[in-house]
């Protein structure tokens, strides 16, 4: 008997190599993300975090290595097969990346229309449902992105990322640009949705509060590979200069004290 499909890791990378001209960004990245995990990807500026997410999304291709999503190769499949895999994840880009000429409702409806999986009436209902999911009002559907606050842009972008009911959610710096209160509220929303919907999440973040509130595992990218892949508690014990600077520097220590103080 074949094992059930959900036995496969959601993401599996082996020996991923990335080069931009002479710039060798990844040199043998191995990473396995299992269903239900929330993996925070951290690393210095330019270490290749966003590029790794872009590989998963299919926006860039590694020069070498293997990359599997839901047990299926992303690198040697046919286009329609890859498109089917791509419907199984949602992405929240750093600045939200909403279409400025579209209303909020049209932005959320966009992936549903592209995938041709619902009628107009169903799309209207789904948009209302997704807006409620991210704690926005039905009337917000008529606004344009320029009329929204930064926190609302993130919520709309999250609603759009969840439009096709993905199993995997990819978040690039989800709290960047939000003030501390909005950031805390947005993290609480992501955590609530992750649990309710049983999502697997990979997030790139520089923010230790966000990481500590969400991550079941921390993947540290440095020296062109994954330096450490463990719980936050075990990551803190790893003796490496980047990990020291990131978690045990002044900012890191204050953030961890806040988190461990029971927030
Ligand atoms: N399309 C591209 N063409 C050329 N070089 C690129 C491209 N995309 C990324 N790079 C380079 O690859 C390296 C990794 O970039 P990436 O944006 O993935 O890093 P990052 O870890 O996400 O950085 P940050 O934390 O500063 O956002 C950098 O040196 C960057 O200049």
Image (cartoon, rainbow, N blue to C red):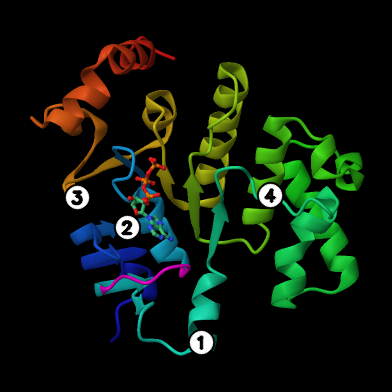
User: Pointers 2 and 4 in contact (CB under 8 A)?
Assistant: no
Q: Which mark is first along the chain, 4 or 2?
A: 2
Q: Is residue 62 magenta?
A: yes
Which image quadrant: the C terminus? top left
Q: Report which residue position mark 4 lands on.
A: 159
Q: Is residue 217 above or below residue 120?
A: above
Residue segment shown in magenta:
58-63
Q: Position of residue 167 (x, y in %)?
A: 50, 61
Q: Report which residue position mark 2 lands on.
A: 34
> Residue reaching furthest front?
22
Q: Main secondary structure of the magenta part?
A: loop
Q: Report which residue position mark 3 lands on.
A: 226
Q: Is residue 106 above or below residue 82?
A: above
Q: Which mark is first along the chain, 1 or 2?
A: 2
Which image quadrant: the N terminus? bottom left
Say which mark, if any, is on residue 79: 1
Q: Position of residue 98 (x, y in %)?
A: 71, 51
> Residue reaching furthest left?
239
Measure the C-alpha gap from mark 2 to mark 1: 25 Å
């Amino acid at each position: 008997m074949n094992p059930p499909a959900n036995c496969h890791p959601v993401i599996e990378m082996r020996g991923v190599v990335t080069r931009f001209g002479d710039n060798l960004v990844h040199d043998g990245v191995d990473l396995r993300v299992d269903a239900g995990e929330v993996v925070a990807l951290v690393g210095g500026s330019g270490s290749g975090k966003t590029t790794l997410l872009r590989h998963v999304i299919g926006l860039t291709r590694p020069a070498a290595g293997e990359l599997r999503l839901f047990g299926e190769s992303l690198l040697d499949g046919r286009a329609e097969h890859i498109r089917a895999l791509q419907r199984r994840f949602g992405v929240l880009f750093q600045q939200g990346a909403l279409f400025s000429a579209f209303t909020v409702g049209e932005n959320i409806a966009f992936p549903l229309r592209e995938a041709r999986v619902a009628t107009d009436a169903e799309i209207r209902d789904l948009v209302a449902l997704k807006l409620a999911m991210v704690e926005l009002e039905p009337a917000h559907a008529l606004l344009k992105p320029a009329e929204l606050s930064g926190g609302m842009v993130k919520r709309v972008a999250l609603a759009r990322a969840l439009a096709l009911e993905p199993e995997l959610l990819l978040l690039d710096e989800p709290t960047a640009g939000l003030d501390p209160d909005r950031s805390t509220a947005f993290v609480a929303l992501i955590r609530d949705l992750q649990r309710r919907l049983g999502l697997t999440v990979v997030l790139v973040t520089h923010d230790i509060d966000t990481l500590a509130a969400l991550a079941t595992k921390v993947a540290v990218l440095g020296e062109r590979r994954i330096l450490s892949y463990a719980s936050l508690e075990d990551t803190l014990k790893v003796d490496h200069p980047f990990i020291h600077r990131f978690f045990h520097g002044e900012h890191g220590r204050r953030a961890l004290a806040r988190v461990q103080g029971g927030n």
